[in-house]
Amino acid sequence: MDVKRIGVIGAGQMGGGIAQVAATVGLDVMLMDIKTEFIEKGMAAISANLSRAEKKGKISAEEAKAVLQRIKSTTDIAGMQEADFVIEAASEVEEIKGKIFQKLDEVCPAKTILSSNTSSIPIGRIASMTSRPDKVIGMHFMNPVPVMKLVEVIRALPTSDETFQATVSLAEKMNKEVAVANDYPGFIANRILLPMINEAIFCLYQSVGTRESIDTVMRLGMNHPMGPLALADLIGLDTCLAILETLHKGLGDPKYRPCPMLRQYVEAGWLGRKTGRGFYSYS
Ligand code: CAA
């Protein structure tokens, strides 16, 4: 399958990053979100990333302009009907994703592959909401998408070999390396990452250390590029909570229970970088 046009649902940090990377490798992109202001914010972030790359001499002004021109946008999901391959990167809420996949199934031609960038929701459950479960797959990018090399490709029980091969080819075309995971809650990346982040939050909650000492231990002691609390702020505390709840519910093991402090922050609207406040403050 030769993928030329991709649809991206969600213009937030993940969707915007996916759109940028796809357009950079020459794919035509249709970026969809429910509000014009969300699309404008996403496009502004892409422009800022490209300007930074241009200033560093990594791309020319013409290339940056061409990348932006390859990204079209819409607030209507029917705009996905031209796409060969759709990557959904909406909020990590199963009900929202379910509705999107049902709608995509209606508007997209039968040949179109529908993938989800979900961080933890089982792909089989999403696939079962469509009439093409063999063409549904997980394509899990890491944040920040333009920088991180990995795409975790998740095969659900009904995913066909053709769908899997087309997804691996697309990820490689986007200059990413693929790791394949089977369809269990959290897959590989978040099954391992989120318990570490949750434990770091428990350390803060139980005053084992300050946020700075916890992050410093992991940065300098384990050579992580950033500490787990700073990373939670980057991922979004609402997303971290949603992933832990999926792990807890899906695997039934109390070791995945979210730290009460994480829930408290989310309920206060302290969601990390995107709201200007999480474990750290951002101005
Ligand atoms: N978008 C695009 N580019 C970005 C960026 C962003 N949001 N943030 C940083 N960059 C680029 C910078 O422009 C810079 O590029 P050059 O090398 O070309 O100059 C490069 O990344 C390094 O940036 P900085 O020098 O500003 O800062 P840094 O060296 O501290 O790196 C970081 C920043 C890449 C975020 C690094 O700290 C890092 O790798 N952190 C860990 C990220 C991580 O673990 N991500 C996975 C999260 S889990 C996930 O995404 C899955 C999930 O489901 C929850």
Image (spheres, rainbow, N blue to C red):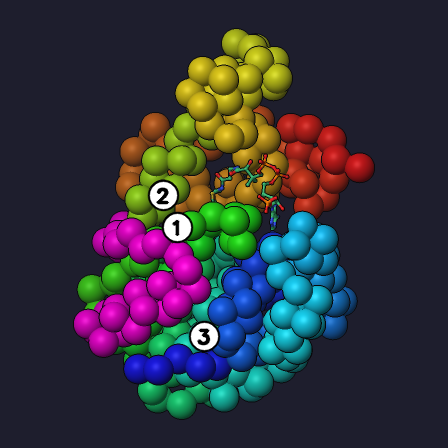
Q: Residue at x 59, y 31 (%)?
A: 230
Image spot of residue 120 (x, y percent): 39, 50
Residue range highlighted in magenta? 159-184
Is the C-beta separation of discs 2 and 1 under 8 Å?
yes
Residue in the foreground of this view, choosing between 247 and 155: 155
Disc 2 marks which residue? 189
Q: Quadrant of the C terminus?
A: top right
Q: Would you say residue 175 sits in the magenta stretch? A: yes
* Viewer-nearest of discs 2 and 1: 1
Residue 131, visible in the rendered structure: no
Label 3 and label 1: CA atoms lie apart by 19 Å
Q: Secondary structure at mark 3?
A: strand
Give percent across and percent down for residue 109: 40, 90
**Sequence-wise, which precedes: disc 2 or disc 3?**
3
Q: Is residue 78 left or right of residue 127?
A: right
80 with respect to 56 (left or right): left
Residue that carries the numbered disc 1 in the rendered image: 150
Whole-percent x and y of residue 209?
Answer: 56, 10
- Based on the picture, tell me whether residue 128 belongs to the magenta stretch: no
Residue under the image location 29 percent in, 38 percent down: 252
Label 2 CB sits under 8 Å from any ligand 1 atom = yes
From the viewer's perspective, tell me whether residue 232 is left or right of residue 37: left
Residue 97 position (above or below residue 107): above
Disc 3 marks which amino acid? Answer: Val
The residue under label 3 is 86
What residue type is disc 2 on?
A: Ala
Q: Earlier in the sequence, mark 3 or mark 1?
A: 3
Please rate how many residues cluster around mark 3, counting C-alpha atoms within 10 Å: few if below 14, some from 14 to 19, many from 20: many
Mark 1: amino acid: Leu
